Amino acid sequence: MIELDREPLNVLSAIDHVSDGAVGGIDVFIGTVRETTRGKKVIALEFEAYEKMALSEFEKIVAQAEEQWPIHRTAILHAVGRKEIGDLAVVIAVSAAHRDAAFKACRYIIDTLKQTVPIWKKEIFEDGEVWVAAHP
């Protein structure tokens, strides 16, 4: 399950996707829109993506994680469009027979995603806005 979505992200659908009787551990990372950045009050965030390339990069990251750890299934959901304080920006769920692989793969996926996937974030403040290099 790999999705870019303008609608609210569904954590339970990600967990359902990775759940299975063969797994003993599911790790979930949820990234939310916070109210301050570098001491400035954030009103909202806006995400844009080069969709075709982003989805391809997500697939590569999952393949790399599968090469490193014995994971069962993964789900990556990333928001696009305007998101308000408290909204979900990203959900990553990873299942594996054992928790260690699920934890390590989930951390790898979020860290690599932030470095390689063409998703851009605009921070909207009370006194202006700025595009930031959260992703390339």
Image (cartoon, rainbow, N blue to C red):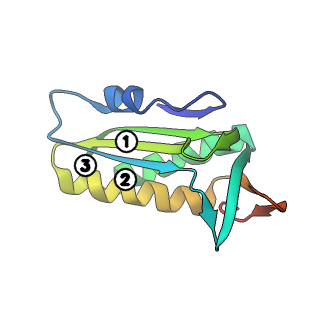
Q: Quadrant of residue 72?
A: top left
Mark 1 and mark 2 lie on one chain; the one further toward the N terminus is: 1
Count of labels in the image:
3
Amino acid type at mark 2: Cys
Residue hosting label 3: 70
CA gap, disc 2 to disc 3?
A: 12 Å
Label 2 Cα neighbours within 10 Å, binned few <14 / some 14-19 / many ≥20: many
Label 1 Cα neighbours within 10 Å, binned few <14 / some 14-19 / many ≥20: many
Is 48 or 45 nearer to us in this picture? 45
**Residue 68 placed where, x, y %?**
33, 58
Amino acid type at mark 3: Pro
Residue hosting label 2: 106
Dots 1 and 2: beta carbons under 8 Å? yes
Q: Is residue 66 above or below residue 23?
A: below
Mark 3 and mark 1 lie on one chain; the one further toward the N terminus is: 3
**Residue 79 placed where, x, y %?**
61, 39
Dots 2 and 3: beta carbons under 8 Å? no
Is 33 or 21 nearer to us in this picture? 33
Amino acid type at mark 1: Ala
> Which residue: 68% across, 58% down?
42
**Residue 58 placed where, x, y %?**
55, 45
> Which residue: 56% across, 33% down?
3
Q: Furthest-right residue in view?
A: 128
Residue 93 is tagged as 1
CA gap, disc 3 to disc 1?
A: 14 Å
* 25 on left or right of 3: left
> Which residue: 79% across, 58% down?
126
Q: Is residue 107 above or below residue 1?
A: below
Q: Secondary structure at mark 2?
A: helix
